[in-house]
Amino acid sequence: MPENKSPLERLGLDTPAALALHLPIRYEDETELTSVEEAISGFGNANVQTQGKVILCEVKFRPRRQLIVVIADQDAELVLRFLNFYPSQQKQMAIGNFLRVRGEVKQGFMGPEMVHPTVKQVLPETPLPQQLTPVYSTIAGIGQITVRKGIEKGLKDPSVRKFLREIIPLGSITDPRYSFLKDLPSLEESIFSLHYPTVQTNKDALLERTHPAWRRIQFEELLAQQISLQRAHIERQKRKAPCMNQSPGGFVQRLFDLLPFTLTDAQKKVWGEIANDLAKPYPMNRLLQGDVGSGKTAVAALAAAHAIDHGYQVALMAPTEILAEQHFRKFEPWFLELGVEMVWLTGSLKSKEKKLAQEKIKTGQAQLAIGTHALIQEGVEFAQLGLAIIDEQHRFGVRQRLQFHGRQGSEDIFSHQLMMSATPIPRTLAMTYYADLEVSVIDELPPGRKPILTKLFKDSRRDEVILGIRKELTLGRQAYWVCPLIEESEVLQLQTVTDTFESLKAKLTEYRIAMMHGRMSSEEKSSIMADFKSGSIQLLVSTTVIEVGVDVPNASLMIIEHSERFGYSQIHQLRGRVGRGEADSVCILLYSEHLSFAAKERLKVLRENSDGFIIAEHDLSLRGPGELLGSRQSGESMLRFVDLQRDAWLVSLVKDFAHDILATAPELAELHLRRWLGSRADYLKA
Ligand code: ADP
Ligand code: MG
């Protein structure tokens, strides 16, 4: 515990790297001094620094206990007021001491004063610093001065200089594409000038992190990341995977004939890309992106059929049971027709059924296994897994996705991986986090899709909305009512669904209404979904359990209550449940009276845009990459100094640079990586 740890160790600054890279969050300018008189006459301005002798130091009660100190130079006096203070401060500011203080002068009760200024005890002749003063992030109990002194001392250690040595000679770059890098300061120079910038340094550039010294650090960080990702890519290509380049049973053609539609051009294109990967002797690692409803499932089915045709097993994993079941239902008629044996495996199966499914997977009798993450849990062993398909991949953590890699029948054969996502990943993000991922995009919706009209309604217009539902149901169509998200409490959430359900039932007595929520058993949920699909339920009141993948073409109206509580992608995914059939579809976003500015903006963006990519860009700028990629990744986010929005251009430059370095000087790339990532390098293999 803290007893035997130094303050720097407690801050986690126990290596030269951590220490050097604990860069200031801002700076204070203590290089200038004004007289007390000037400080007072300019009051209301930003921070000033002045100094004088203490002529009064008293604890007063008016009405609260406070410490009043007055300092003076030859011309004027200034009041310092402290509402919280320690005895040590009283000592420091005892009458007769000389103080240098820094703060904002305001007009107070007793005239011009500084409330809680920064105070330093000095001598009148103590020189002013020549550099801006760094302000570091710290934790309770460790003051700025301690951190500052610790870092100053630490940076003098020879191990820091060694850590900061130049590895890649940027100065000798000749390629004009990288001329920007050539002019950057060295790493050592950058680190020192960020800790101790001279007064002349452009302060805005420092704070906005666009200063060349920052650029150098950002370059280093990105380079390590790109090298790591690209190396993972090279490693992957050295692995063995089943080469699927034939069509023994003509499964793919037969499935084409079974599909009730012809593929869109976009679907054909991505199927071509996938088939091409599957024919390679190394494992595919491909992300299939397509907006909600773009038809990813059919493409996944083709890939599955192709792998099974070659005698391999296929696993299809979805993040929720509802979603997995939808896949199962869709796949079942097609694969039964092909004579493929399917198994269903989720956590909620009875242990006997689970054992049976696991057994079939182990013996290879099951050719297609569909389920939730139960598919990658202990006890599941595939005889010969050739392809793993992971739907809504961002919902799974990196580790969970990894487990499929490790679970092969034969040790040195890896399965191909196809991930699917309706949450588009903006280009910059794809380049930085997913450099070892090929991306296919379905950029076209099946024909006949009607755009969804999104409308914003104040909550007070609920009755109008209910009239709208009535109209839609009377026309024989169906509707969803999505209840507000209450993240803090599942109980409250349940309560809300129940209340809403009861009140809608009372108002729409002649219609068949059902309720669905996360507390129900999966049997209950799937029986409700089946009834909704068949049309025997007309209005489905539910929580966000219907968020992804649910497919009922006859549903043409969705109401999202308290839509301001949802994020961009949640609403976009939710509303994608409608607009899948013949009818014009509408999504109504109900919102409460008092909207924050951000929420208003968000709802406006959603109303005006139906393109998932545009929405994802907004999402990225709002929440940052961590959340977009899923919470598991966010904690381990690699980029501390790079901002993907601000530095997008740097990302593409460094991507190319990393590629070149790996090709021309792999040993330098390795050194750089080791310096920058240390033990975290492994993580990136994901
Ligand atoms: P998502 O990409 O959201 O997973 P799905 O694969 O569930 O989308 O497809 C959405 C709906 O579109 C399904 O009802 C599916 O049968 C239908 N669909 C898919 N591809 C086509 C196509 N090429 N032509 C017509 N309908 C299609
Ligand atoms: Mg889907």
Image: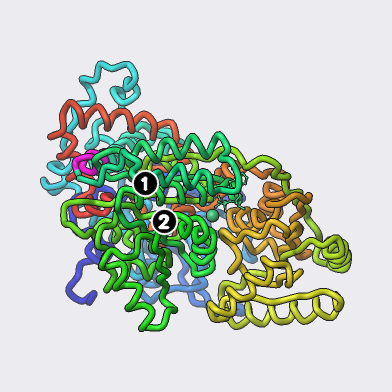
**C-alpha distance separating marks 1 and 2:** 25 Å
Question: Is 164 in front, or is 250?
Answer: 250
Apparent side of residue 16 relative to residue 146 in the rendered image (left or right):
left
At horizontal 63% and vertical 70% (from top left) the residue drawn is 530
How far across and how far down the image is residue 582, in percent?
A: 75, 49
Amino acid found under the numbered disc labelled 2? Ile
Q: Give the prevailing secondary structure in the magenta stretch.
A: helix
Amino acid found under the numbered disc labelled 1? Gly
Apparent side of residue 270 relative to residue 537 in the rendered image (left or right):
left
Which portion, as a residue range, is magenta? 233-238
Label 1 belongs to which residue? 249
Chain-order first, disc 1 or disc 2: 1
How far across and how far down the image is residue 245, in percent?
A: 31, 38
Q: Which disc number belongs to residue 566? A: none
Can the viewer see residue 46? Answer: no
- Helix, strand, or loop for circle 2? strand
At horizontal 22% and vertical 64% (from top left) the residue drawn is 9
